Amino acid sequence: MRMRVYIIPLLLSALAVGGRPCEAAPPPVHVRGQVVLYDPLAGPGPYIADFIVKLRGENVRFVRLLYAPEGFGFDAPGPQQNHMLPESMFSNGKVVWRFAVHSPADREEQAACKERKVLLSRDPSQPGPPVVPKEVYRPVPGASEKRVPPTTSLECFVVESWEEASR
């Protein structure tokens, strides 16, 4: 009987400290498209990524995709070799990819999607210290689309897996 009294507070405190909610992740949705913009500052390697994809289809539509297989927190464990994104994803905008994605499922993923990616820089044409926000996203070489809506207006999803669409 006493074990129950101690186990429940221990489980609750573990969740409060940073454990993920017990709810199941939503089922993945599959999307196809080309990476047109990416954030070169997203993470310390090809295992964390933030990029914009132009979806294939009749209507031109863009989405923001985030990838962090071990989580988005600063305390996430290091990556495994099989989690590395291929270099061609960010160096060849002509490649069509198939992504399995889901909507942000927990607070960590929701916070990552809400984060606004800008650099603050001084406008050289203006005297003094005023700073202007500047998008951090860079075009992928070979990407055909140059006009992308503001990234803050795009739907955001979390990548579970990927493959080249030709496979």
Image (cartoon, rainbow, N blue to C red):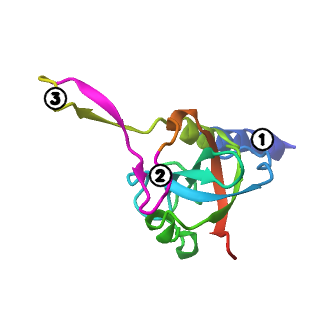
Which residue is pictured at 70% across the width and 44% down the height?
103
Answer whether residue 18 is visible to the viewer in this image: no
Image quadrant occupied by the N terminus: top right
- Helix or strand or loop: what does disc 2 sit on? strand
Residue at image mark 1: 8
Q: Position of residue 45 (x, y in %)?
A: 42, 63
Q: Compared with residue 138, is residue 47 higher up or lower down, i.e. above or below?
A: below
Which residue is pictured at 54% across the width and 72% down the height?
80
Q: Nearer the viewer, mark 1 or mark 3?
A: 3
Badge 1 amino acid: Ile
Q: Earlier in the sequence, mark 2 or mark 1?
A: 1
Residue at image mark 2: 37
- Kindly report the distance in space between the C-alpha atoms of the residues bearing marks 1 and 3: 61 Å
Q: Earlier in the sequence, mark 1 or mark 3?
A: 1
User: Residue 130: within the magenta?
Assistant: yes
Q: Position of residue 21 (x, y in %)?
A: 72, 43
Which residue is pictured at 59% across the width and 38% down the height?
154
Q: Position of residue 164 (x, y in %)?
A: 63, 71
Badge 2 amino acid: Leu
- Helix or strand or loop: what does disc 1 sit on? helix
Please tell me how crowded label 2 is: few (under 14), some (14-19), or many (20+) other residues with Cα within 10 Å.
many
* Front in this rendered view, residue 130 or 165: 165
The magenta segment? 129-146
Instruction: Determine which of the numbered discs, if any, sits on residue 125 in the image.
Output: 3
Q: Magenta stretch mostly in which secondary structure?
A: loop
Q: Position of residue 145 (x, y in %)?
A: 50, 51
Instruction: Determine which of the numbered discs, if any, sits on residue 76 in the image.
Output: none
Q: Earlier in the sequence, mark 2 or mark 3?
A: 2
Which residue is pictured at 51% across the width and 71% down the height?
86
